[in-house]
Image (spheres, rainbow, N blue to C red):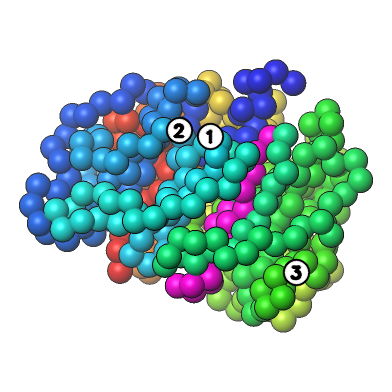
Amino acid sequence: MNTMKISKVILALSAAFSLFLSACEKTDPAPNANDEAVKYALMVTGGAFPNQTAYFSGFKQLPSGVVGTEGAAELTGSGIMHSYKEHQYLTTFGAPATLRKYGFDAQGRPQELGAFVVQSLNTFGAVDFVSDTEAYAASNGFGGVPKLVKFNPTTMQITGTIDLTPIQKRGAKDVFYLGMTHRDDYVFMGVNYQTASFSNLGDSVYVAVINRKTDKVEKLIADGRCGIIWNGGSASSFGPSSIVLDENKDIYITGTGNQAKVPSGVVRIKNGQTTFDPTYFMDLTKTVGSDCQGLFYYGNGRALTLKSEDPANYPFDDSKNAGYRYFKVDLYQKTSQGELSALLPKVSSSAMTSKWDESKLYLSAPTPTTNAMYSLDLSSGTVKKEFDLSAGVSNGFVKFK
C-alpha cells in the first residue's frame, strides 16, 4: 500500500476527511469585534493533504452568509473538535497525538487552556467525557501501538493508561480504537483489527468492555452479523459515530459491510448488559438500500446515516468522490424513512451534525467544490442552508448552553 493510501485510511479512522478543500480565504470581518460573549464555536479544515490547516473560531451570533477564518486560531493539520460543557477539545492529524483544550477570552478570541500529548501516534479516534475530572482518549497511528489514556478534563493531566494487552489478537498487524461511550461502571470502545496487507481481520464488530473502577479490560465482545467498525466518534464529537447511547441507556453499534460477505448494520448492547443482544439486528444494507457509514443520533430512536452511492470507494472517499447521501433511519422500528432532503447534495464521509436543543439539527454538506452548513427543523422536517464555509470542511459546530 502506498503512502498516500495509508494516509487516507488514517484520516478516515479519525473522522477527519478534509480532503477536497478550497484555498483558505479570509474575507469576512472578525467574528467578535467587541466584548460580547461568544455563543458559538466552529472548527474548519482547509487546504489539501498533507498541507492542511485547522481553524477554530468563536461567534457571538449564529453565523450567516459566507464564513471565513478571520480571528481564528490556526492549527497545523486536519482537525477534529470535541465539545464538553463550555470548552472545546481539539486535535489535528500528525504526530505526536495532541489534545488541546480551548476557550475564549474576554474579547472573544480563542485561547488555549491546556494540552497533553501521546507520543509516537498521530491522532485520537475517540474522546469520551464522563465528568469534569474523568475522561478517556483513544490515540491511533498507522504502524504504532495505540493507547487508551484516562485524563482529567479540568487540568488536562493524564491520570492513567489502560492496559489493553487482553484485547490483542493474533495476526493483527495494526489495531485502531474507534468510537467510545460509557455507561454505569464501564467504558465501551470499538476496536478495528487489520492484517499485514491492511485487510480486515475478521468480519465482525469488536467492542472492548473496560471497567472504569479498576481501569482494566473485562472482555472483548464480537458480533459477526455485520462488519468491522470503521468510524470513530463519541457523544462529544460531530462526525458519523460507530457507537451511540440512547435515552434508555441502550448502546447501538454500527459495523460496515465487507464486499458482500456481511452487510453494514446495527447491533445493540441493552441497558445493564455487557454482551450483544441476540434479538436485535438492523441490516442497513438491506433496509437503506446499500452499505452505510455510521450514525448521527438525535433522539427517540431517530438517526441519520450516510448511504453509500459509490461502492468502489466504500468505506473511504477522496477529493473526487463525495459518494454519500443522508438517509433517515428509526433504530427502534429498524426502518428507513428515505433520503433526508433532495436539497442536499451528495456528501463526503467527513460530514458532521450537531444538536443542542430539541428544535433543530445542524448538518454539514462537504462536496469536492463547496462546503456549507444546513439545518433540519425537527418538527417539520424542513431542511435549509444556513451558511457557506469559504475555508473548507467543518469539523465541529456548537452553541454554548
Picture coordinates of residue 85, whole percent (x, y): 38, 67
Specify start and end residues of the magenta stretch as a single range. Answer: 126-142
Instruction: Name the quarter where the C terminus is drawn.
Output: bottom left
Marks 1 and 3 sit apart, C-alpha to C-alpha, by 28 Å
User: If you read the primary sequence from the N terminus, does the residue marked by circle 1 or circle 2 appear first?
Assistant: 2
Instruction: Note whether residue 246 is visible.
Output: yes
Look at mark 2 in the image and give the residue it sits on.
77
Q: Is residue 185 above or below residue 290?
A: below
Q: Secondary structure at mark 1?
A: loop
Query: Residue 219 has which mark?
Result: none
Residue type at tag 2: Gly
Earlier-in-chain disc, 2 versus 3? 2
116 sits to left or right of 201 = left
Q: Residue at x 30, y 57 (%)?
A: 103
Residue bearing mark 1: 94
Q: Amino acid at mark 1?
A: Gly
- Residue 182 is drawn in which quadrant? bottom right
Q: Which residue is disc 3 drawn over?
A: 216
